[in-house]
Amino acid sequence: MSENPDPERLKALAKKLEAAQAEPTRKTHDAGKYSGAAPAWQMIVELTTGMAIGVVMGLALDAWTGLSPLFVVVFTLLGFAAGVRVMMQTAAAYQRKAEAEALEEKQ
């Protein structure tokens, strides 16, 4: 290494440092044609999870009480209703997010 650094290289390094420390560029992630798949899969999982929990609870109660099809039917319907409710809440949250982003873009 030399005792005296090259002033031109130091100036170039200073410019690079200033550019790196300047306003960071905001990267946007574009998923292309699959951009709507994540919310859709989330809602499908929420619906099937609600139904699965209802079926398991119904089967457990049927085995415990001995009333074979009663609780499976009732809790499957309750699980479906709960899954639809959670799905609708998720859809509303995505809608609010989209409206907020559209409002932000207008400003």
Image (spheres, rainbow, N blue to C red):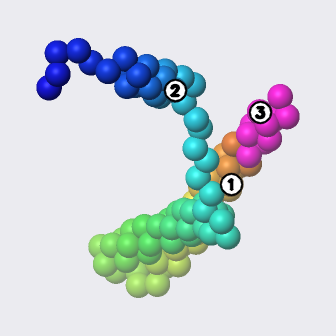
Q: Dot 1: within a 10 Å radius of its alpha carbon, few (fewer than 14), some, or many (20 or more) residues?
A: some
Query: How far across and how far down the image is residue 41, in percent?
Result: 56, 68
What residue span does the magenta drawing correspond to? 98-107
Q: Which quadrant of the figure has residue 32?
A: bottom right
> Residue at label 1?
91
Question: Which mark, residue 104?
Answer: 3
* Residue displayed at 58% across by 44% down: 27
Question: Label 2, label 1: how many angstroms apart (C-alpha)?
Answer: 41 Å
Kindly indicate whether the residue at mark 1 contacts the one at mark 3 (C-beta within 8 angstroms): no
Residue 36 visible in the picture: yes
- Which amino acid does the dot numbered 1 rest on? Ala
Q: In front: 92, or 70? A: 92
Q: Earlier in the sequence, mark 3 or mark 2?
A: 2
Question: Label 3, label 2: how many angstroms apart (C-alpha)?
Answer: 27 Å
Residue 40 visible in the picture: no
- Which amino acid does the dot numbered 2 rest on? Ala
Does 40 sit left or right of 105 as displayed?
A: left
- Which amino acid does the dot numbered 3 rest on? Glu
Quick one: SS at disc 3? helix
Quadrant where the C terminus is found in the figure: top right
* Residue displayed at 58% across by 35% down: 25
Quick one: SS at disc 2? helix
Query: How far across and how far down the image is residue 102, in percent?
Result: 80, 41
How many callouts does the rendering have?
Answer: 3
Indicate whether residue 65 is drawn in magenta.
no
> Residue at label 2?
19
Numbered disc in front, either 2 or 1: 2
Q: Earlier in the sequence, mark 2 or mark 1?
A: 2
Quadrant where the N terminus is found in the figure: top left
Q: In front: 69, or 12? A: 12
